[in-house]
Image: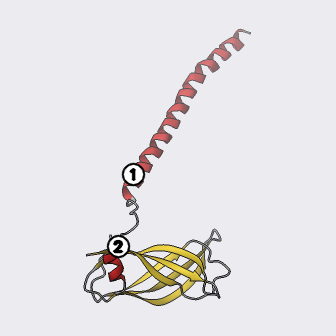
Amino acid sequence: MAAEGSKDRSERSRFPAAFAVGLVIVLLLVGGFLWLTRVTERRVPPQVGKLPFGTEEQAYAGQIHFDPGQMSQATNFLNQEFTYVAGTVSNAGPKAVRALDVVLEFHDPFNQVVLRDPQRIITGDEQPLKAGESRDFQVTLGAHLPVEWNRQYPVIRITGLVLK
């Protein structure tokens, strides 16, 4: 009986030590998670809001032209479907384009818009599109294209523009 009493005491004395070790491990995991989220926040560029599209930008938008390219679809290992839209953007105006937002409009056979997908095809992080220059672009659509889509290349409309 005396042996059982000492066994209970030794188990009781181990409990606070095991609890303390578990608490330290949890605190280390939480601290590591917080540190990682702060490190990755610094690496991810801040989301830039909507680009301006005032009268100057609207007037200049007529100088920017899009040549259709190819469209393709792919499925990843999670069975998610992605659509890629490629083309060429040209700047026929006298100014450089630092950033460019567009919306891709997909239509049905009756020419009604079935999907509008906003995209930024020139970001402020890359070289501006200089006057007289052309550049290829490719955007990825994560959304499924509606079944009503007429299988034609989308209409591209400019929605935001930063000039240099």
Regarding residue 98, the answer to whether it shows in the image is: no
What's the residue at 53%, 31% (across, down)?
Answer: 23
The amino acid pointed to by label 1 is Val
Identify which residue is drawn at 37% across, 69% down: 51
Q: Position of residue 27 (x, y in %)?
A: 49, 36
The vertical placement of 164 against 152, above or below, is above
Left or right: where does residue 161 sit relative to residue 6? left
Left or right: 27 in relation to 46: right
Tell whether 46 sits left or right of 105: left
**Label of residue 54 in the image:** 2
Q: Residue type at mark 2?
A: Gly
The residue beneath circle 1 is 39
Choose between 125 and 104: the one closer to the eye: 104
Q: State which mark lies toward you, 1 or 2.
A: 2
| Rendering coords of residue 89 (x, y %) | 39, 85
Q: Residue at x 74, y 9 (%)?
A: 1
Q: Quadrant of residue 3?
A: top right
